[in-house]
Amino acid sequence: MSKPYVLGRFSSARGALLLAFGATASAFGVASCCALPILLTTVGVSVGWLGGIAVAAAPYRTLLLGLSALCLVGGAIMLWRQQRVAMTCGPEGACTPPALRVVVFVGLTIGAILLWLGYSYV
């Protein structure tokens, strides 16, 4: 009977991972206009490839900001729930693997940083 519970936890982990990826991708589009070129040029990385992304994302800046914020909040809520379940996880192993929770946390952190940079530099 614990099999559906385990599968439910992994589908929740996949959902949190997809939300973190969506937040990072949309925040990257917002930050590609001004923040990323400034920061990457400061460290000596060529930014010519960002021009196409910035031109394509510029008309949808407000939409991408909202989408990124929604994905970040949804991913953070899902990660918080996974952490709560992991604290009470029994020996049957019905928890999301710790490595996957770390990947989701890193993705959400990068997405939040890119969102803040994209919002503040324009």
Image (cartoon, helix red, strand yellow):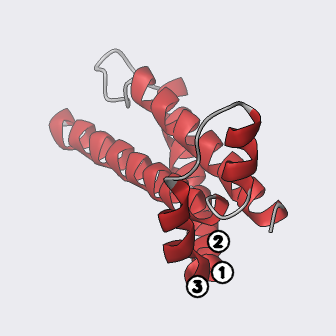
Dot 1 corresponds to which residue? 62
The label number, if any, that marks residue 84 in the structure image: none
- At 66% from the left and 64% from the top, the residue drawn is 33
Residue lying furthest bottom: 59
The residue carrying pointer 2 sits among few (fewer than 14), some (14 to 19) or many (20 or more) residues within 10 Å by Cα, namely many
The residue carrying pointer 1 sits among few (fewer than 14), some (14 to 19) or many (20 or more) residues within 10 Å by Cα, namely few
Q: Left or right of 13: which side holds 79? A: right
Q: Nearer the viewer, residue 17 or 92?
A: 17
Q: Is residue 104 above or below residue 116?
A: above
Work out how far the residue at label 2 is from the one at label 3, CA to CA, in angstroms. 12 Å
Q: Nearer the viewer, residue 49 or 73?
A: 49
Dot 3 corresponds to which residue? 59
- At 22% from the left and 41% from the top, the residue drawn is 7
Residue 50 in the image: state x and y as whole percent.
54, 56
- In the rendered structure, are the residues bearing label 2 and label 1 in contact, judged by CB atoms less than 8 Å apart? yes
Residue type, mark 2 in image: Leu
Q: Is residue 50 above or below residue 86?
A: below
Q: Nearer the viewer, residue 74 or 29?
A: 29
Residue 117 in the image: state x and y as whole percent.
76, 54
Work out how far the residue at label 2 is from the one at label 1, CA to CA, in angstroms. 5 Å
Nearer the observer: mark 1 or 3; the answer is: 3
* Quarter in which the C terminus is drawn: bottom right
Work out how far the residue at label 1 is from the one at label 3, CA to CA, in angstroms. 8 Å
- At 59% from the left and 68% from the top, the residue drawn is 70
Q: Secondary structure at mark 1?
A: helix
